[in-house]
Each structure stands twice: as structure tokens, then as C-alpha cells.
Amino acid sequence: MAVVRYLLVTLLVIFVLGVSREGHAVIYKYVDEKGDILFADDLQKIPAQKRSSAVMVSGAEAAPEEAAAERAEAAAKVEEVRREQADARQRHANAFRTRLTISLSGAAAVVVVLFVMGNIDALRSHAKVRKRVRAGLIAGLAVFLLVMHVTDVIGLFRRTGGTVSGGFSGIQEQHLEGQIEEAQQGR
């Protein structure tokens, strides 16, 4: 009987101490670079650049007006970050489309020149010249394409870890997210 009483008293003390500790715990809320709302129980766990914008949501009595204003401010920050991310995605997509269009135009020009070269009667007897010009055009096109798209290829492999999963759309999404992160870190 004494053991049961001792056990009950111990559990009651643990329960009371646990409840009182939780009742006074301080919880902080902040918005990270991605626009996600995060919570922390210690101010030191919040990244240094985000501490000034952290809001205490538990452990201190706040007026309802202040809490509503804080929620509205946090929602506005989240919406602003989302708009910036969407703008960055759009800018990157437009730049990629422009590079792709230029690359396709350059490749088409090389094909046209090779076709015209093959149909010029004066060059038919000069096989060595045709061969060298053809090799030069193809090498020039390869260098042109490499220069135009090296950052795209490097970015894709850096974000996918050198593996391809989820098809082209998955790679493109990962690449765009990486570009957005780089742009936000560059600020």
C-alpha cells in the first residue's frame, strides 16, 4: 500500500510540474525564406536574421488586437514572399525560353548552310573543303550550344544531385526552386 501511495504521489508531482512548465512555456513564430511559418520554443533556435521578426505566440498575454495585427502582418509577409517566388520563376522561365529559341535558331541556320553547301555545284569537286567547312560549322554549333546552356545543365545536376527522377518536369521544378533560392540569398 505504501508503494502505491508513493507511486501516486510521484506521478502527481510529475504531472503538476509538467503542466505548470507547459503553461509558462514561450513559443515564438517566424516566417522563413521560403515563406513557411515556423515555430520555436527558444529564441536561440531561430536564425539570427529572423529573430527580429519573430513573434511570441504563447507564454505571454497579448491583446487580441495585437495578435490579429501580428497575424495580418505575417500573412502579408508570406504573400509577399510567394509573389516574389512566382516573379522569380517567371523571369527564369522567360530567360530559359529565350536561350532555347536562340539555340534552335542557330542550329537551324547551320542545317540550312550545310544543305546549301551540298547543293552548290562548284563545291562538289572540293570534297576536302566541304568536309572542313562542315566540321567547322558543327564544332562552332557545339561551342555555341555549350556556352548558351552550360549554366542550365550545371544547375540541373547540382539540384538533382546528378540523378534524374520525376522526368523533365521534375527536373525543371527543382531547377527553378534552386534559382529562386539563389536569388533570395543574393539579396
Image (tube, rainbow, N blue to C red):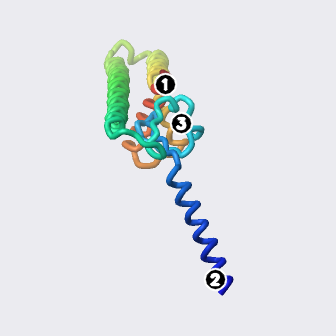
Residue 161 is drawn in which quadrant? Answer: top right
- Residue 185, given in percent of the width and then of the height, sits at 50, 26
The alpha-carbon separation of the residues under discs 2 and 3 comes to: 62 Å
Q: Secondary structure at mark 1?
A: helix
Type of amino acid under label 3: Arg
Tag of residue 146: 1
Instruction: From the image, state whether disc 2 or disc 3 is nearer to you.
Output: 2
Label whose residue precedes the other's in the sequence (1 or 2): 2
Q: Secondary structure at mark 2?
A: helix
Q: Is residue 131 visible?
A: no
Residue 74 is drawn in which quadrant? Answer: top left
Tag of residue 158: 3
Q: What residue is drawn where x is 32% and y is 32%?
A: 76
Residue 169, placed above or below residue 112: below
- Residue 91, given in percent of the width and then of the height, sits at 34, 24
Circle 2 is placed at which residue position? 4
Residue 46 is drawn in which quadrant? Answer: top right
